[in-house]
Amino acid sequence: MTMRSIRTGASDIPENNVLQLTTDLITQSGIVNPPGGGFAVALNSNLSVEVAAGRAYLIASGGNCYPIISDANASVSVNTNSSGNPRISSIVLYENLSNTPGTDGSNTATLFSVDGTPAASPTAPSNSTIQTAIGAGNPFTVLANVEVPSGASDLATQGTLTDERVSVGFNPAMSLDEAVYASTITFDISIQKVHFIQQLTGNPTFAVVNCPVGQAFVIRFTEDSTGGRTPSWFNTINWGDYQPTTTFLANKSYLYGFLCTAPEVYDGIVINENI
C-alpha cells in the first residue's frame, strides 16, 4: 500500500503551486466522495481496523491544503483496553509536516489511532487531544470512532464503529459555470472559477481565456452513456507525474484543477476520476 501526499518530491509540479491551488479551492478538511469507499473504516477480528483506499484534502492551520492519495487498504492497530471501562479511540488521517516526502510522495500522510479516556459513558478524544497526539500543526481529519470495551480482543464482534468522515468543502466564492456541450468549450476565468460540463456527447476542444498568473480554477465534466469522449486540452499544461486517464468511462465524472503559472501556462492536477 502506498499512501502519498502531493508535496515536493512527489511530482514535477512545484509544491507551492499545488498548495496554492488546493488552498484556493478547499475550505474544509475531508474525504472525497463519502459514503463510498473513500477511507471507509471497518472493524477487524482483532485489535485493529481496516481503512479503505481513497482521496482526501487536509487543511493546515496556516491555510495550506494537502492532497492525500491512498491506493490500497491499510490496517491500523488499536491499543488494548484493560481499564475496566469502555474507551473510544478515534481513527485519524493526518499529514506529518515534519517528514520529508519520498520521491513518490510517501512518508508524510499517516493513519493513526488516538485514545480517549475510559469511562462508564466514554467520549471521543477532543480535537486538542488528537492534535497533541499527532503533533502540533499537523492537519487531520477523523475517519471513525471505535468504542473498545474493557478486555476486548475482537473488535468485529465486541467493538462499535461510528463513521465520522466528512466531505471536503469547496470555496463558495469560486463561482460555478454549468456549460453545455459544444465542439469548442471556452472557460472564461474572469467570470467563473469552477466549470461543470454536465454531459460530453462528443470530443470537445477546451479553451481558456482571461486567466491571470496565479489564478486557480477547476473543470469537471461527465461522460454520456457512450463514454470514451476525450477532450483536447488547452496549451500549455504541465501535468507532472499524475497524468489524466486516457480511458473515460460511460456516465462517470472527471475533476481536474489548474493553476496559471505564466501567461497561457498551467500546472494541472488530477483531483478525482471515475466519480
Image (cartoon, helix red, strand yellow):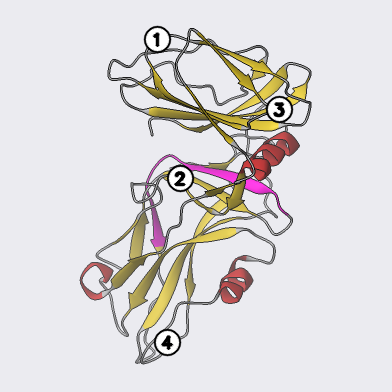
Q: Mark 4 points at which residue?
A: 118
Q: How crowded is mark 2: few (under 14 residues within 10 Å), some or many (20 or more)?
A: many
Q: Point out the image quarter for the N terminus.
A: top left
Task: Assess whether mark 4 and mark 1 are in contact (beta carbons under 8 angstroms).
Answer: no
Q: Give the range drawn in magenta.
A: 63-76
Label 4 amino acid?
Pro
Check disc 1 and report the residue beneath it.
202
Mark 3 and mark 4 residues within 8 Å of each other at the beta carbon: no
Q: What element carries label 2?
A: loop
Rendered image: mark on residue 61? none
Question: What's under tag 1, amino acid-wise?
Answer: Gly
Q: Does the magenta stretch include residue 168?
A: no
Q: Is residue 150 left or right of residue 125?
A: left
Who comes first in sequence, dot 1 or dot 4?
Answer: 4
Look at the numbered discs 1 and 3 and tell me whether their residues touch, using CB distance below 8 Å: no
Residue 145's x, y, as percent? 40, 69
Query: What secondary structure characterizes most of the magenta part?
Result: strand
Q: What residue type is labelled 2?
A: Val
Badge 3 amino acid = Ser
Q: Quadrant where the C terminus lies?
A: top left
| Spatial separation of the CA atoms under disc 3 and disc 4 | 54 Å
**Residue 3 appears left or right of 78:** right
Whole-angstrom CA distance, mark 2 to mark 1, is: 27 Å
What is the CA distance from the residue labelled 1 to the residue labelled 4? 59 Å
Q: Where does the image place residue 76, in percent across and percent down from the top left?
A: 41, 60
- Label 1 CA crowd tier, 10 Å (few <14, some 14–19, many 20+): some
The answer to whether marks 4 and 2 mark residues whose Cβ atoms lie closer than 8 Å is no
> Is residue 84 in view?
yes
